[in-house]
Amino acid sequence: MATPTGPRVPCSEAAVARALLFGWVLVRVAGATGTTDVVVAYNLTWKSTNFKTILEWEPKPINHVYTVQISPRLGNWKNKCFYTTDTECDVTDEIVKNVKETYLARVFSYPLDAISSTGEPPFTNSPEFTPYLETNLGQPTIRSFEQVGTKLNVTVQDARTLVRVSGTFLSLRDVFGKDLNYILYYWRASSTGKKKATTNTNEFLIDVDEGENYCFNVQAVIPSRRANQKSPESPIECTSQEKVLSTEMFFIVVAVMLVVIIFIIVLSVSLCKCRKARAGRSGKESLPLNVA
Protein backbone atom coordinates (compact mmCIF):
# COMPACT_ATOMS: atom_id res chain seq x y z
CA MET A 1 0.00 0.00 0.00
CA ALA A 2 1.47 3.32 -1.04
CA THR A 3 2.32 5.96 1.52
CA PRO A 4 0.65 9.32 0.96
CA THR A 5 3.06 11.87 -0.35
CA GLY A 6 0.92 14.95 0.02
CA PRO A 7 2.14 18.18 1.74
CA ARG A 8 2.42 18.33 5.64
CA VAL A 9 -0.24 20.19 7.57
CA PRO A 10 1.47 22.76 9.91
CA CYS A 11 0.81 22.56 13.72
CA SER A 12 -1.65 25.02 15.01
CA GLU A 13 -0.38 28.08 16.98
CA ALA A 14 -2.47 26.97 20.01
CA ALA A 15 -0.62 23.65 20.18
CA VAL A 16 2.75 25.43 20.07
CA ALA A 17 1.67 27.77 22.86
CA ARG A 18 0.53 24.84 25.01
CA ALA A 19 3.86 23.07 24.50
CA LEU A 20 5.84 26.17 25.45
CA LEU A 21 3.70 26.71 28.56
CA PHE A 22 4.15 23.10 29.62
CA GLY A 23 7.92 23.37 29.17
CA TRP A 24 8.03 26.59 31.23
CA VAL A 25 6.07 24.92 34.05
CA LEU A 26 8.50 21.98 34.05
CA VAL A 27 11.44 24.36 34.29
CA ARG A 28 9.86 26.27 37.18
CA VAL A 29 9.08 23.04 39.05
CA ALA A 30 12.60 21.77 38.52
CA GLY A 31 14.04 25.07 39.69
CA ALA A 32 11.88 25.03 42.78
CA THR A 33 12.93 21.54 43.82
CA GLY A 34 14.53 21.63 47.27
CA THR A 35 13.23 25.15 48.10
CA THR A 36 9.73 24.23 49.18
CA ASP A 37 8.58 25.85 52.41
CA VAL A 38 11.70 28.03 52.78
CA VAL A 39 10.81 31.31 54.48
CA VAL A 40 12.96 34.30 53.57
CA ALA A 41 14.28 36.53 56.35
CA TYR A 42 12.52 39.79 57.05
CA ASN A 43 12.74 42.76 59.42
CA LEU A 44 16.53 43.00 59.16
CA THR A 45 17.73 45.42 61.84
CA TRP A 46 21.11 46.78 62.90
CA LYS A 47 21.71 46.87 66.67
CA SER A 48 24.87 48.77 67.53
CA THR A 49 26.27 50.42 70.68
CA ASN A 50 29.77 51.89 70.88
CA PHE A 51 30.42 50.06 67.56
CA LYS A 52 29.53 46.62 68.94
CA THR A 53 27.23 45.67 66.04
CA ILE A 54 24.70 42.85 65.66
CA LEU A 55 22.47 42.19 62.64
CA GLU A 56 19.08 40.80 63.70
CA TRP A 57 16.18 39.43 61.66
CA GLU A 58 13.05 37.25 61.75
CA PRO A 59 11.65 34.56 61.76
CA LYS A 60 13.02 31.68 63.81
CA PRO A 61 13.88 28.89 61.32
CA ILE A 62 11.91 25.65 61.31
CA ASN A 63 13.24 23.59 58.41
CA HIS A 64 15.93 25.90 57.09
CA VAL A 65 19.14 27.72 58.10
CA TYR A 66 20.64 31.12 57.41
CA THR A 67 23.92 32.50 56.12
CA VAL A 68 24.83 36.18 56.34
CA GLN A 69 26.92 38.22 53.95
CA ILE A 70 28.21 41.74 54.57
CA SER A 71 29.94 44.20 52.29
CA PRO A 72 31.09 47.82 52.20
CA ARG A 73 29.09 49.86 49.72
CA LEU A 74 31.72 49.42 46.98
CA GLY A 75 33.42 46.26 48.29
CA ASN A 76 33.07 42.50 48.00
CA TRP A 77 30.64 40.29 49.89
CA LYS A 78 32.02 38.34 52.83
CA ASN A 79 30.27 35.35 54.41
CA LYS A 80 29.44 35.45 58.13
CA CYS A 81 27.52 33.12 60.45
CA PHE A 82 27.37 30.10 58.12
CA TYR A 83 24.24 27.91 58.10
CA THR A 84 23.03 29.13 61.46
CA THR A 85 19.70 28.61 63.18
CA ASP A 86 20.16 31.87 65.08
CA THR A 87 18.40 35.05 64.05
CA GLU A 88 21.31 37.35 64.77
CA CYS A 89 24.88 37.70 63.61
CA ASP A 90 27.76 39.62 65.18
CA VAL A 91 29.45 41.62 62.41
CA THR A 92 31.53 43.87 64.66
CA ASP A 93 34.86 42.60 63.37
CA GLU A 94 33.90 43.71 59.86
CA ILE A 95 32.51 47.17 60.55
CA VAL A 96 35.30 48.27 62.91
CA LYS A 97 37.76 48.03 60.01
CA ASN A 98 36.38 51.38 58.84
CA VAL A 99 33.59 52.87 60.96
CA LYS A 100 33.01 55.71 58.48
CA GLU A 101 32.22 53.26 55.67
CA THR A 102 28.61 52.42 54.72
CA TYR A 103 27.73 48.72 54.91
CA LEU A 104 25.04 46.47 53.47
CA ALA A 105 24.17 42.95 54.60
CA ARG A 106 21.97 40.19 53.24
CA VAL A 107 20.57 37.04 54.80
CA PHE A 108 20.24 33.84 52.70
CA SER A 109 17.73 31.10 53.53
CA TYR A 110 18.81 27.49 52.87
CA PRO A 111 16.58 24.40 53.12
CA LEU A 112 18.06 21.83 55.48
CA ASP A 113 18.08 19.17 52.76
CA ALA A 114 19.64 21.37 50.07
CA ILE A 115 22.52 23.22 51.76
CA SER A 116 24.93 21.95 49.10
CA SER A 117 22.71 23.16 46.25
CA THR A 118 24.58 25.07 43.56
CA GLY A 119 21.71 27.44 42.84
CA GLU A 120 21.42 30.80 44.61
CA PRO A 121 18.98 30.58 47.53
CA PRO A 122 16.48 33.35 48.31
CA PHE A 123 17.82 36.27 50.36
CA THR A 124 16.81 39.61 51.85
CA ASN A 125 18.86 42.81 51.89
CA SER A 126 19.34 44.93 55.00
CA PRO A 127 19.12 48.71 55.16
CA GLU A 128 22.43 50.51 54.73
CA PHE A 129 24.37 51.17 57.92
CA THR A 130 27.11 53.73 58.62
CA PRO A 131 28.59 53.02 62.08
CA TYR A 132 30.12 56.46 62.66
CA LEU A 133 26.73 58.11 62.15
CA GLU A 134 24.39 55.47 63.55
CA THR A 135 25.94 53.45 66.39
CA ASN A 136 24.26 54.24 69.70
CA LEU A 137 26.32 55.94 72.38
CA GLY A 138 26.58 53.81 75.50
CA GLN A 139 25.88 55.08 79.01
CA PRO A 140 28.87 57.12 80.26
CA THR A 141 30.35 56.82 83.74
CA ILE A 142 31.64 59.42 86.19
CA ARG A 143 35.26 58.61 87.03
CA SER A 144 35.70 61.10 89.88
CA PHE A 145 34.27 64.26 91.43
CA GLU A 146 35.22 66.74 94.13
CA GLN A 147 33.56 69.78 95.65
CA VAL A 148 35.89 72.32 97.23
CA GLY A 149 34.37 75.55 98.43
CA THR A 150 32.45 77.08 95.53
CA LYS A 151 33.88 74.77 92.84
CA LEU A 152 32.62 71.36 91.71
CA ASN A 153 34.98 69.31 89.55
CA VAL A 154 33.59 66.29 87.65
CA THR A 155 35.62 63.95 85.40
CA VAL A 156 33.94 61.64 82.87
CA GLN A 157 35.33 58.22 81.93
CA ASP A 158 35.37 57.55 78.17
CA ALA A 159 33.91 54.19 77.15
CA ARG A 160 36.17 51.75 75.35
CA THR A 161 35.16 50.52 71.88
CA LEU A 162 36.12 47.50 69.79
CA VAL A 163 37.77 49.76 67.21
CA ARG A 164 41.43 48.88 67.26
CA VAL A 165 44.55 50.62 65.94
CA SER A 166 47.96 48.95 66.20
CA GLY A 167 46.56 46.42 68.65
CA THR A 168 45.10 49.06 71.00
CA PHE A 169 41.36 49.46 71.55
CA LEU A 170 40.23 53.05 71.08
CA SER A 171 37.95 55.04 73.36
CA LEU A 172 34.94 56.98 72.14
CA ARG A 173 37.04 60.15 72.41
CA ASP A 174 39.73 58.57 70.22
CA VAL A 175 37.15 57.77 67.55
CA PHE A 176 34.96 60.89 67.62
CA GLY A 177 37.45 63.53 68.80
CA LYS A 178 35.83 66.93 69.33
CA ASP A 179 32.60 65.63 67.77
CA LEU A 180 31.94 63.99 71.16
CA ASN A 181 30.51 66.28 73.84
CA TYR A 182 29.34 65.64 77.39
CA ILE A 183 26.44 67.32 79.17
CA LEU A 184 26.47 67.68 82.96
CA TYR A 185 23.09 67.99 84.67
CA TYR A 186 23.42 69.24 88.26
CA TRP A 187 21.16 70.51 91.03
CA ARG A 188 21.12 71.21 94.75
CA ALA A 189 20.41 68.07 96.74
CA SER A 190 17.59 69.97 98.46
CA SER A 191 16.08 71.16 95.15
CA THR A 192 14.71 69.75 91.90
CA GLY A 193 15.68 72.61 89.60
CA LYS A 194 18.32 71.33 87.18
CA LYS A 195 21.10 73.27 85.50
CA LYS A 196 23.39 71.99 82.78
CA ALA A 197 26.87 72.55 81.42
CA THR A 198 28.47 71.24 78.20
CA THR A 199 32.06 70.44 77.32
CA ASN A 200 33.93 68.84 74.41
CA THR A 201 36.54 67.53 76.86
CA ASN A 202 36.11 65.10 79.74
CA GLU A 203 36.14 67.55 82.64
CA PHE A 204 33.69 70.02 84.17
CA LEU A 205 34.55 72.80 86.63
CA ILE A 206 31.42 74.67 87.68
CA ASP A 207 30.51 77.26 90.29
CA VAL A 208 28.32 76.08 93.19
CA ASP A 209 27.20 77.44 96.54
CA GLU A 210 29.64 76.76 99.33
CA GLY A 211 28.38 74.35 101.98
CA GLU A 212 25.54 73.04 99.76
CA ASN A 213 25.37 69.43 98.62
CA TYR A 214 24.89 68.84 94.88
CA CYS A 215 23.70 65.89 92.82
CA PHE A 216 24.55 65.38 89.15
CA ASN A 217 24.85 62.98 86.21
CA VAL A 218 26.29 63.13 82.69
CA GLN A 219 25.24 62.29 79.15
CA ALA A 220 27.28 61.81 75.97
CA VAL A 221 26.12 63.69 72.86
CA ILE A 222 27.22 64.17 69.25
CA PRO A 223 25.52 67.41 68.10
CA SER A 224 26.49 66.95 64.44
CA ARG A 225 24.29 63.86 64.07
CA ARG A 226 20.76 63.91 62.74
CA ALA A 227 19.72 60.89 64.81
CA ASN A 228 21.05 58.92 67.78
CA GLN A 229 22.61 62.08 69.16
CA LYS A 230 22.44 61.30 72.88
CA SER A 231 23.37 58.43 75.16
CA PRO A 232 21.42 57.31 78.23
CA GLU A 233 22.24 59.40 81.31
CA SER A 234 24.75 58.05 83.80
CA PRO A 235 23.79 57.04 87.36
CA ILE A 236 23.36 59.98 89.76
CA GLU A 237 26.18 60.94 92.13
CA CYS A 238 26.00 63.40 95.05
CA THR A 239 28.52 65.35 97.10
CA SER A 240 28.57 65.10 100.92
CA GLN A 241 29.52 68.47 102.33
CA GLU A 242 27.64 67.68 105.58
CA LYS A 243 30.02 64.80 106.27
CA VAL A 244 33.00 67.07 105.74
CA LEU A 245 31.58 69.66 108.14
CA SER A 246 30.78 66.98 110.72
CA THR A 247 34.36 65.74 110.60
CA GLU A 248 35.69 69.24 111.07
CA MET A 249 33.30 69.83 113.95
CA PHE A 250 34.42 66.55 115.53
CA PHE A 251 38.04 67.68 115.61
CA ILE A 252 37.05 71.10 116.88
CA VAL A 253 35.00 69.58 119.72
CA VAL A 254 37.83 67.19 120.60
CA ALA A 255 40.32 70.07 120.67
CA VAL A 256 38.02 72.15 122.88
CA MET A 257 37.50 69.22 125.22
CA LEU A 258 41.25 68.68 125.50
CA VAL A 259 41.76 72.34 126.33
CA VAL A 260 39.02 72.18 128.96
CA ILE A 261 40.49 68.98 130.48
CA ILE A 262 43.98 70.49 130.60
CA PHE A 263 42.54 73.64 132.17
CA ILE A 264 40.71 71.58 134.80
CA ILE A 265 43.85 69.58 135.57
CA VAL A 266 45.97 72.70 135.89
CA LEU A 267 43.29 74.37 138.00
CA SER A 268 43.00 71.30 140.23
CA VAL A 269 46.76 71.12 140.76
CA SER A 270 46.88 74.82 141.52
CA LEU A 271 44.04 74.56 144.04
CA CYS A 272 45.68 71.56 145.66
CA LYS A 273 48.94 73.46 146.08
CA CYS A 274 47.09 76.46 147.50
CA ARG A 275 45.32 74.27 150.04
CA LYS A 276 48.58 72.68 151.12
CA ALA A 277 50.23 76.07 151.44
CA ARG A 278 47.35 77.39 153.58
CA ALA A 279 47.39 74.25 155.71
CA GLY A 280 51.13 74.76 156.29
CA ARG A 281 50.69 78.35 157.38
CA SER A 282 47.78 77.43 159.68
CA GLY A 283 49.91 74.76 161.37
CA LYS A 284 52.72 77.21 162.10
CA GLU A 285 50.33 79.77 163.57
CA SER A 286 48.84 77.15 165.96
CA LEU A 287 52.21 76.24 167.58
CA PRO A 288 52.74 77.71 171.25
CA LEU A 289 55.24 80.54 171.75
CA ASN A 290 58.56 79.69 173.41
CA VAL A 291 59.01 81.34 176.95
CA ALA A 292 62.51 82.63 177.70
Image (cartoon, rainbow, N blue to C red):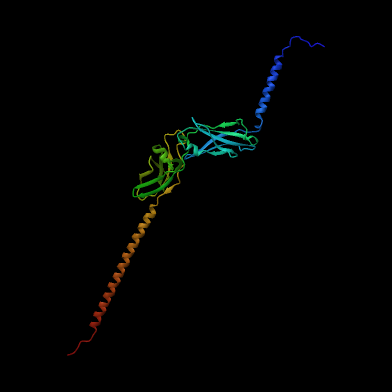
Residue that sits furthest to the top in the current view: 6
Location of residue 18 in the rendering, given as x and y in whole percent from the top left corner: 70, 19
**Residue sitting farthest toward the bottom:** 292
Q: Position of residue 62 (x, y in %)?
A: 64, 38
Q: Position of residue 269 (x, y in %)?
A: 29, 72
Which residue is situated farthest in the front direction here? 1
Q: Is residue 234 above or below residue 105?
A: below
Quick check: can you spot residue 58? no
Q: Residue at x 29, y 70 (%)?
A: 267
| Residue located at (57% from left, 31% from top) | 124
Quadrant housing residue 3: top right
> Relative to 279, does residue 125 appear above or below in the rendering?
above
* Residue drawn where x is 27% and y is 75% of the image: 273
Q: Residue at x 31, y 70 (%)?
A: 265
25 vs 46, left or right, is right
Does residue 260 appear anywhere in the picture?
yes
Q: Position of residue 17 (x, y in %)?
A: 69, 18
Q: Quadrant of the N terminus?
A: top right
Q: In the current view of this chain or complex, which residue is farthest to the left?
A: 292
Name the residue nearer the viewer: 242 or 76: 76
Q: Which quarter shows the C terminus? A: bottom left
